[in-house]
Structure formats: C-alpha cells, structure tokens
Image (tube, rainbow, N blue to C red):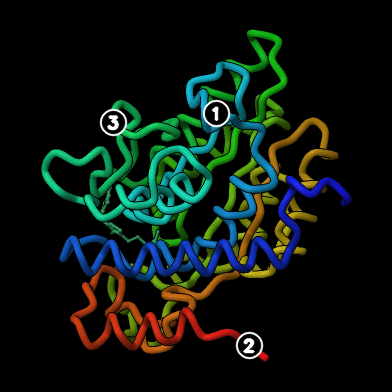
Amino acid sequence: MNDPSIPGIPQLIEIARSVRIDIVQAIHHAKGGHFGGPLSAVELLVALYFRELNIDPVHPQWEDRDRFILSKGHSAIALYAVLAERGYFPVEELMTFDAIDSRMQGHPDMKQTPGVDMSSGSLGQGLSAGIGMALGARVLGKSFRTYVMIGDGESQEGQIWEAAFIASRYQLDNLVAILDYNKVQQFGWQYPEPLLPIDHPEEKFAAFGWHVIEIDGHDFNAILNAFDQAKMVKGKPTIIIAHTVKGKGVSFAEGKYQWHAKVPNDEELTLALAELVRREG
Ligand SMILES: Cc1ncc(C[n+]2csc(CCOP(=O)(O)OP(=O)(O)O)c2C)c(N)n1
C-alpha cells in the first residue's frame, strides 16, 4: 500500500487511541451514555471508516456510498467519534453529546447527524434495515455494500434470526454483519455459572447459511483481511465474528458489565486518560 492518503496500521492505531479519548471525555462531560460497548467497537469502526467504506465525508448523502448501520445503537458515541475524526463534523462537537439540542443524541438519529445511515437504539432491528439496503442496491443495479454491527446481547433478539434467515435466502453477498463479540451485556447473568450472551455464534450463523469469519476484533490486520475476504464471497452474506473486550483500553472497565453504562467520575477520567495516552516502547 503506497498511497500516502490511505492510513496504514500505525496510523489506524493512533486514530483508535484518539477515538477512545474522545469517547471517554464525551461521556464524562455529558454525565451519561454507554461506556463498555463503544470502547469494544473502536478498531472495527476505525477500520470501516478509514479503510473499508466507500464514502465521502463532504457528501454524507452521496447515493452510491457504502452503508453502515450501528444496530447496537447505544454505542453511538463511538460512531460519532469516528465520524468526527473522519471529518464529518468538528471533533469539538462531540462535547455536545447527549445534550438536548445536540446533533449527537444518546442513540443514532439519521435525521440529525451527518454520516448516520440508520437510526437505531431499539436492539434487534439494524440487520433487517441492512437487508433492505442490500436488496435496494441489487434492485437499483448499484454496487454499494452494506455493513451492520450487532452486539452479542442484541443477538438474543428474535428479529436478528429472522433477518439472518432471510439474508441468506436472498443470497445477499453485498451484506456484511459484524458481531462485536465482547461476551458481556448489560447485566451479569452469572447464575448458575457465567453465561455468554450467545454461545457458538459461528455455528448458528453458518447453520443459517452465512459465510463466517472469526477474528480478533482489536487487530487491524485481521479486520482488514476479513473485509477483503468478505468481498470475495459469492451467493451468501458474510458475518465477521469479532472477538473483543468490553471497555477495551480502560483497564478498570475491561470485561466488566458494571461499566456497561457507567459514567466515569473525575478521578476515573484522569486514570482512563493516563492509560489511553500512554505509548508503548
Ligand atoms: C429492544 C431493546 N431492549 C433493551 C434495550 C436496553 N439495552 C441497551 S444496551 C443493552 C445490552 C446490549 O448488550 P450487547 O448487545 O452485548 O451490547 P454491548 O456489550 O456491545 O454494549 C440493553 C439490554 C434496548 N436498547 N433495546
């Protein structure tokens, strides 16, 4: 890759670091929002918006753009931070997150925020909307692709499986689902033993007729390879099962359901920022 305008892995890692800092600061400032889910999705979103999606931040409504739906809409601040870093609107605007007149509400609103292709927040619906977009591309003879990020807790919704069934029936090879498989949802579900929100999603999606790719969702090489592989698949939709860590990058929140939607206090903000700005080596 020789084009200097295309960020390489070291730049993507730095962008992810900035996005995490944006997320933590915005949530602290807003005194609201979700914490763990946005942080687990950072590398996936950065790879999408800085390398994979065919988009134009200057023309967010360009009709031939690739589409992205954040079906786990409670992670909106991660999407806003990536959109801001990508140039859709000023990074400073992130500090209006969740305020009453802000373009950045607690859940994505396609009528408010430039770059948001689908309103979401009521879990379970985004994959169905993505099917509509993918079918729309086919009907119109357009080559744009549709990407949908779902959560593992969200995958307990029946509508996800209705969508999984129909997407493969329609052979939607222009549709890619990304499962942010952080293995933690809103509450603990620890009884009688720790329970995953969903177990063996790879077997379930394969049984529904999907092409399945399983990766480390924090490894940019693996993410970009998965996107490349998905483009080669013909006649079926692809799901990328991305193993992630809820709260990734903030050690005291990692893997903890208690940080699903907790707001850091001043001391926790300082600790989190100290970790996020620290550079290895
Ligand atoms: C239909 C619906 N039911 C409940 C909720 C409340 N809710 C918001 S986030 C969440 C847990 C989601 O877990 P998961 O999909 O694993 O998300 P992540 O761990 O990535 O944050 C719940 C139950 C909702 N937004 N929509």
Please, what is the three-letter code of the amino acid marked with disc 1? Ile
Task: Give neighbour class at mark 3: few <14, some 14-19, many 20+ (Cα, 10 Å).
Answer: few
Mark 2–mark 3 Cα distance, whole angstroms, equals 38 Å
Which-is-in-front pick, marks 2 and 1? Answer: 2
N-terminal label among 2 and 1: 1
Task: Find the residue positioned furthest to the left.
Answer: 100
Task: Find the residue positioned furthest to the top.
Answer: 140
Q: Quadrant of the C terminus?
A: bottom right
3 and 1 marks in contact (CB < 8 Å): no
Residue 93 at what x, y percent from top left?
30, 47
Q: How many discs mark residues in the rendered view?
A: 3
Secondary structure at badge 2 equals: loop
2 and 1 marks in contact (CB < 8 Å): no
> Please, is residue 108 above or below residue 275 in the view?
above
N-terminal label among 3 and 1: 3
Secondary structure at badge 3 equals: loop
Of residues 50 and 169, which is closer to you in this image?
50
Residue pointed to by mark 1 = 131
Please, what is the three-letter code of the amino acid marked with disc 3? Gln
Q: Residue at x 44, y 67 (%)?
A: 20
Task: Give neighbour class at mark 2: few <14, some 14-19, many 20+ (Cα, 10 Å).
Answer: few
Asked whether, in this view, residue 200 is left or right of residue 69, the answer is right
Residue pointed to by mark 3 = 112
Q: Residue at x 71, y 54 (%)?
A: 7
2 and 3 marks in contact (CB < 8 Å): no
Residue pointed to by mark 2 = 280
Task: Give neighbour class at mark 1: few <14, some 14-19, many 20+ (Cα, 10 Å).
Answer: many
Q: Residue at x 77, y 44 (%)?
A: 230
Please, what is the three-letter code of the amino acid marked with disc 2? Glu
Which-is-in-front pick, marks 2 and 3? Answer: 2
